[in-house]
Amino acid sequence: MVALMRFFFLLLISCLISSTSLADPLPYRGWSHLAQRLIAAGIPATVVHEAFNDERLPEFDFVPFTLKPKETSSLYSDHVSEARVTRATEYLQINNKIFHQAEKIYGVNRYLVAAIHSIETGCGKVLGQELVFNRLARVA
């Protein structure tokens, strides 16, 4: 177990060293590595530039990886309650056409997307005040 943990730690460090430069060649406040990857993947440079230069986007900060997350399983226990599952099922039925189209276009199972949507937004009820882009980009 210790050897496995040491392996993952060294792998993580080597990835960080190889993907992080001291100078940010583009004006993206630490986000250049991801911006370059998106452009290389075919996202138009103008779209990437606009997203990463949005004044609401904070400077990149490191997301630590751990084999023991801080969140407890009880944090998610409500998500499997009968009421929550019923609400998610109804939400999926109401929006079936959209979920089906997304599944067809992107190849991601609509039930998985609906489950994530249920957990993260309460089926669209909790949208918050913060940008989602930087939260997802930090773990990309």
Image (cartoon, helix red, strand yellow):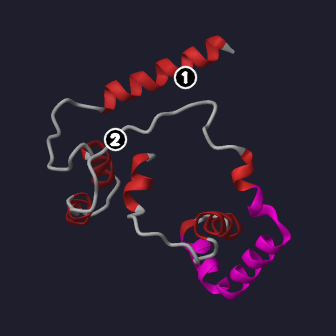
The residue shown at (51%, 33%) is: 65
Q: Main secondary structure of the magenta part?
A: helix
Residue 28 is marked as none
**Category of crowding for the residue at label 1, using alpha-carbon neighbours closer than 10 angstroms: few (below 14), some (14–19), many (at least 20):** some
The local secondary structure at tag 2 comes to loop
Residue 73 image position (x, y, % from top left):
73, 46
Which quadrant would residue 102 be assigned to in this image?
bottom right
Name the quadrant containing residue 60: top left
Tag 1: amino acid: Phe
Q: Secondary structure at mark 1?
A: helix
Which residue lies under the disc numbered 1? 8
**Left or right: 16, with 78 as reference point:** left
Residue shown at 23%/31% (left/top)? 21
Residue with the mark numbered 2: 61
Crowding at mark 2 (Cα within 10 Å: few <14, some 14-19, many 20+): few
| Quadrant, the N terminus | top right
Is residue 24 shown left or right of residue 114? left
- Left or right: residue 84 compared with residue 39: right
Q: Which residues are magenta?
A: 77-105
